[in-house]
Amino acid sequence: MAKKSKIEHSEFSGEFEDDGVTVLVDIYRSAGTQQDWKLEVISENDLVTTWEEPFATDKDAWEEFLATCEKDGIRSFLEDEDPAVH
């Protein structure tokens, strides 16, 4: 049985609320490594939006999340029309 790798979560991870909508921002990488960070946003309806490309730093991932909120609005994470991949 393969061991599950442990995950390191960024200090930027957590709930984010805007315009009456709360999402969970998860920025993570394998624990104990210097690997790039991955970004996922989970909506109140459990829709998961995942970025395909990793980020060199957790701050880069956080800034991408904020830029997406600014450009598309936080409600874009509630829609299930397009594939939930950036």
Image (cartoon, grey):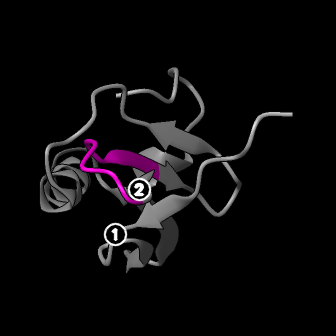
In the image, what residue type sits under mark 1?
Answer: Ser
Where residue 1 appears, as percent x and y from the top left, is 87, 34
Q: Position of residue 10 (x, y in %)?
A: 34, 69
- SS for dot 2: strand
In this figure, which residue is indicated by the disc labeled 2?
28
Residue placed at 18% from the left, 49% from the top? Answer: 64
The answer to whether marks 1 and 2 mark residues whose Cβ atoms lie closer than 8 Å is yes
Above or below 18: residue 5? above
> Residue at label 1?
10
Residue 35 is covered by the magenta coloring? yes
| Quadrant of the rendering where the C terminus is positioned | top left
Q: On the picture, is 57 further left or further right than 79?
A: left
Judge whether 68 appears above or below 21 on screen: above
Q: Residue 37's x, y, as percent?
A: 30, 47
Prevalent SS, magenta region: loop
Say which element carries label 1.
Answer: loop
Q: Residue at x 65, y 63 (%)?
A: 44
Amino acid type of the residue that numbered disc 2 sits on in the rendered structure:
Tyr
Query: In the picture, residue 25 is in which quadrant?
Result: bottom left
Mark 1 burial class by Cα count in 10 Å: few <14, some 14-19, many 20+: many
Figure disc tally: 2
Quarter of the figure with residue 2: top right
- Work out how far the residue at label 1 is from the one at label 2, CA to CA, in angstroms: 6 Å
Provide residue 41's location: percent of width, then percent of height.
47, 53
Which portion, as a residue range, is magenta? Answer: 32-40
**Farthest top residue?**
83
Between 80 and 50, the residue placed more toward the observer is 50
